Image: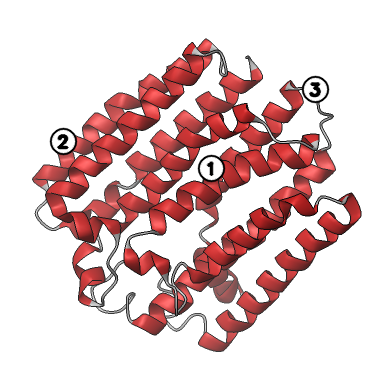
Amino acid sequence: MNSDKLRAWWKASRPPFYIATFVPLLAGWMLAIRDGAPKQVGLFFLINLYSVMVHFATNLANDYFDHYHGADSGRSIGGSRMLQAGQISIGELRASLIILYLSSFFLAVGYMTVAGMWVLSPFVALSIFSSIFYTAPPIKYGYHGLGEVFAGINMGPVMVLGTYWIMTGHPSREAVLVSLPIGIMVAGILYYQSIPDMETDEAVGKITLTVRLGRKGSYLGLIVQWAVVYLLILGLAAGRTLSPVAVACLVTIPIFWRLLRIMPTVKNWQELDRHGHYIRKMYLINGTMIVLGIITG
């Protein structure tokens, strides 16, 4: 495989976005250690390996089926654009999806068989189902305004509680509570990413949440999402689930304020794609504060 092909696969996998997956896994792991579980670094590596494969497969499946539906054509700026550029073929993408989904499935089944933790099978089933049918027919729930809901559930409770459960052998109310702001933040990343493609998505029948809300509603929805995130983190700190360190999440408010001031000044909302780094920075900083709040709690 030449360097150009490697770069194409790297871009298609969107590895920088894996931080969205790593934060909830790390939060669940740190909660488990805080509650007396052994570190089990090897086991945490396996959890990450499964998550990396599903994460990679999700991005590739989105490229594959959005291309099939025409959602990544024309002026659309979604996806990696590797198919449209001819750097990865449909056949290559299809083969990679089969390998990734089968590998992640057998890794999960193998672990649950050895550990006797079949109680986790709904988590595995939901993660793989959500990955495939975000854009795959006949369900393609992302085309019906449910993408953020499934992202929030999978990247919040499923990952945080699932990791905690694997590490300790039992569930935790605190893991569920900590997962809520994390899940909403990841859903918020997906929500913001859909804003620049509102017009092109609607044109091909991809009715995302932002398409349903329109410009004014999407703007207000962004404010509500992040207000809830801050309130949840502060509430967790007040309830001592997180240490006071987590309150430092408030340092990201000026970043959010900057984005809120930019959005009304942009006439062509496709230009908002280049401001997505504000949302990602907020997630990274807030997620770090949550993890530090667990460690020092």
Question: How many labels were placed on the picture?
Answer: 3
What colouring does the structure picture have?
Answer: secondary structure
Q: Earlier in the sequence, mark 2 or mark 1?
A: 1
Q: Is residue 36 visible?
A: yes
Name the residue rendered at 56%, 18% in the picture: 242
Dot label at residue 261? 2
Q: Which residue is mark 3?
A: 36
Q: Is residue 195 visible?
A: no
Pinpoint residue 20: horizontal percent, then vertical percent.
Answer: 52, 46
Name the amino acid type tagged 3. Answer: Gly
SS at mark 3 in the image? loop
Q: Could you tell me how far apart the alpha carbons at marks 1 and 3 are, in whole angstroms?
A: 22 Å
Count residues near mark 2 (Cα–Cα under 10 Å), then give few for <14, some for 14-19, many for 20+: few
268 or 150, nearer to the observer: 150
Q: Quadrant of residue 177?
A: top right
Considering only vertical position in the picture, is 55 above or below 47? Answer: below
Pinpoint residue 261: horizontal percent, then vertical percent.
Answer: 16, 35
Q: Earlier in the sequence, mark 3 or mark 2?
A: 3
Dot label at residue 156? 1
Q: Are marks 2 and 1 in contact (CB under 8 Å)?
A: no
SS at mark 2 in the image? helix
